[in-house]
Image (cartoon, grey):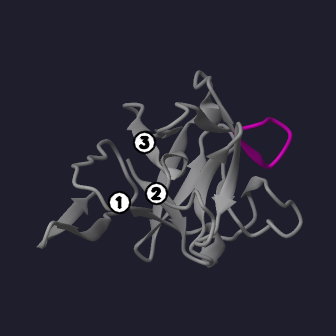
């Protein structure tokens, strides 16, 4: 289980009442189960992004830039390629080539997550990090990636500090 946290505003992707939205640090669900995700390889270099709590998948709707959640993952619109830029990740949709999850347009589309084909790769609004929840567990991402990523998280069990390292 991981949080997907944006570089620009440190917002996280969260599923609320069947919709995917952004969660701010002060929101009650910023560190809750509905803000955690599985990154599941499809065996061909793409990933499904599945919500831990609801088991819904992140997908796109044809003819729009809207990112939604669905219980169905049987189309390429539910597959994401993970790119790397400056130590951060970008999530590109397989079916809608060039569309990357971004929070750039949240002022224009409140409570909606969008994917843009615009050249936003260098902007922080399209860059994400994988954050490990502060509980002890092991999480592995396998399959093809663009680039290499290391994620570090420090937790404490009792009085003993533990460093968790995720190397992709």
Please name the residue that numbered disc 2 is placed on: 3
On-image quarter of the C terminus: bottom left
Residue with the most extreme front position = 158
**Mark 2 to mark 3: distance in Å?**
9 Å
Q: Residue at x 54, y 46 (%)?
A: 34
Crowding near pointer 2: few (<14 within 10 Å), some, many (20+)? many
Q: Which mark is residue 38?
A: 3
Is there CB contact under 8 Å for labels 3 and 1? no
Asked if residue 42 lies left or right of residue 81, the reply is left
> Considering the numbered disc 3 on the image, is that residue within a helix, a strand or a loop?
strand
| Quadrant of res 56 | top right
Question: What label sits on residue 132 in the rendered view?
Answer: 1
Which region of the structure is painted magenta? 60-68
Residue 117 falls left or right of residue 155 = right
Residue occupying the point 46% across, 40% down = 47
Indicate which disc, 2 or 3, sits on the residue closer to the N terminus.
Answer: 2
Number of residues whose C-alpha sits closer than 10 Å to that of mark 3, classed few (under 14), some (14–19) or many (20 or more): many
- From what the image shows, is residue 92 above or below residue 28? above
Which secondary structure lies at badge 2? strand
Q: Is residue 50 visible?
A: yes
Residue at image position (58%, 72%) is 25
In the rendered view, tell whether residue 161 sits above or below residue 81.
below
- Tell me how far mark 2 sits from mark 1, CA to CA: 6 Å
- Distance between mark 3 and mark 1 Cα atoms: 11 Å
Q: Quadrant of residue 126?
A: bottom right
Q: Earlier in the sequence, mark 2 or mark 1?
A: 2
Q: Residue furthest right?
A: 108
Q: What residue is rendered at 36% in x and 62% in y?
A: 147
Q: Secondary structure at mark 1?
A: loop
Q: Position of residue 26 (x, y in %)?
A: 61, 72
């Amino acid at each position: 289980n991981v949080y997907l946290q944006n570089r620009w505003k440190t917002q996280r992707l969260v599923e609320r009442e069947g919709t995917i939205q952004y969660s701010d640090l002060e929101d009650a669900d910023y560190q809750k189960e509905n803000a955690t995700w599985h990154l599941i390889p499809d065996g061909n270099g793409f990933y499904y992004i599945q919500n831990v709590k609801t088991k819904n998948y992140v997908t796109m709707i044809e003819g729009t830039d809207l990112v939604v959640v669905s219980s169905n993952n049987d189309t390429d619109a539910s597959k994401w390629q993970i790119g790397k830029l400056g130590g951060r990740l970008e999530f590109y949709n397989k079916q809608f080539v060039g569309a990357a999850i971004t929070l750039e347009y949240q002022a224009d589309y409140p409570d909606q997550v969008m994917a843009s084909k615009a050249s936003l790769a260098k902007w922080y609004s399209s860059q994400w990090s994988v954050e490990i929840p502060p509980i002890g567990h092991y999480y592995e991402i396998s399959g093809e990636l663009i680039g290499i990523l290391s994620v570090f998280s420090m937790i404490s069990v009792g009085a003993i500090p533990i460093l968790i390292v995720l190397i992709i």
